[in-house]
Image: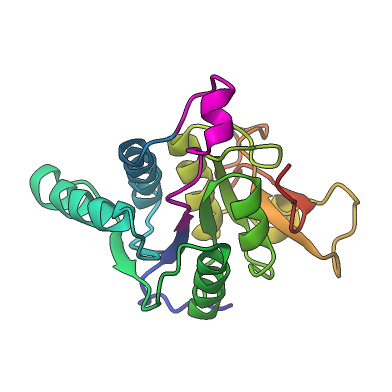
């Protein structure tokens, strides 16, 4: 999609408010992801995206109030601290607290033309988003019950990498990779990788994107 120079740069952010709080994690002595921590993760993500020039973040409204808290905290950071936090805008959609919320939100974000979609959740959430993201790459953050697909990454690093991709500082031929080696016609979801080699001699260098199978099921 060709973007106008005057058009604000926007990304999508899909957060599963129920992820990482499953009874299986409690019984297995695993850590959980409370709502407050998810808010902080998204704020770190958006802070890094804003530093790269992203101006708008589309989020879906949620019953836990994550998007609302992020929007309020981000606005305060812009006014009181002068940080270039993206403006949070909520999608106009009905929330049912089901996986369909993620797929519907993803489809809406793709229709809005976002160049990157960040996802906070586990295998189920990422699979739902990957099934509807088309060619839009995903910036994945593992906050789920099972996290076989999304790797454990720091939100700031993911935001910086996703911002470089969103702003087009990485050419598609360099940034997009698939394990199968196919460059076209592969039904996969691209994910932003933060484990790439950096070269100080090339200002356009940025983290590579790797390809992962679409619709990874929860275990």
Which of the two residues, 60 or 198, is positioned nearer the viewer here?
A: 60
Query: Where does residue 3 sit, x and y in percent of width and height?
Result: 49, 76
Residue sitting at x 36%, y 78%? 92
Residue sitting at x 54%, y 23%? 30
Which of the two residues, 17 or 131, is positioned nearer the viewer here?
A: 17
Q: Is residue 26 magenta?
A: yes
Query: Where does residue 182 sit, x and y in percent of width and height?
Result: 90, 58
Query: Where does residue 100 sit, x and y in percent of width and height?
Result: 56, 69
Q: Considering only vertical position in the picture, is 215 above or below 199?
A: below
Q: Which residues are magenta?
A: 14-32
Q: Is residue 85 visible?
A: no
**Chosen colour scheme:** rainbow
Q: Is residue 169 visible?
A: yes
Left or right placement of residue 74 versus residue 129 in this view:
left
Q: Quadrant of residue 141?
A: top right
Residue sitting at x 28%, y 55%? 65
Name the image quarter holding the C terminus.
Answer: top right
Left or right placement of residue 216 versus residue 200 in this view:
right
Count of all numbered marks drawn on residues in the image: 0
Q: Considering only vertical position in the picture, is 91 above or below 29?
A: below
Which residue sits furthest top?
29
Residue sitting at x 49%, y 24%? 31
Q: Main secondary structure of the magenta part?
A: loop
Q: Is residue 187 magenta?
A: no
Q: Considering only vertical position in the picture, is 201 above or below 135?
A: above
Which residue sits furthest left?
80
Which of the two residues, 211 or 5, is positioned nearer the viewer here?
A: 211
Name the image quarter holding the N terminus.
Answer: bottom right
Query: Where does residue 84 sit, x and y in percent of width and height?
Result: 25, 51
């Amino acid at each position: 999609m060709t973007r106008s120079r005057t058009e604000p740069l926007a990304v999508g952010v899909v957060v599963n408010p129920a992820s990482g709080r499953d009874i299986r994690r409690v019984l297995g002595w695993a850590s959980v992801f409370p709502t407050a921590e998810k808010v902080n993760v998204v704020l770190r993500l958006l802070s890094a995206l804003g530093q790269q020039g992203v101006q708008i973040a589309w989020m879906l409204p949620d019953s836990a109030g994550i998007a609302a808290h992020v929007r309020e905290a981000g606005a305060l950071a812009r006014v009181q601290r002068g940080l270039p936090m993206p403006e949070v805008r909520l999608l106009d959609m009905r929330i049912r607290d089901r996986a369909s919320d993620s797929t519907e939100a993803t489809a809406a974000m793709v229709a809005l033309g976002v160049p990157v979609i960040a996802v906070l959740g586990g295998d189920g959430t990422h699979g739902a988003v990957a099934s509807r993201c088309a060619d839009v790459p995903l910036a994945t953050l593992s906050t789920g019950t099972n996290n076989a697909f999304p790797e454990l990454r720091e939100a700031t690093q993911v935001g910086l990498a996703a911002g470089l991709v969103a702003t087009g500082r990485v050419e598609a031929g360099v940034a997009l990779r698939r394990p199968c080696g196919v460059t076209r016609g592969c039904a996969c979801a691209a994910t932003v990788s933060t484990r790439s080699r950096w070269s100080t001699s090339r200002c356009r260098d940025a983290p590579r994107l790797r390809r992962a199978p679409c619709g990874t099921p929860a275990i």
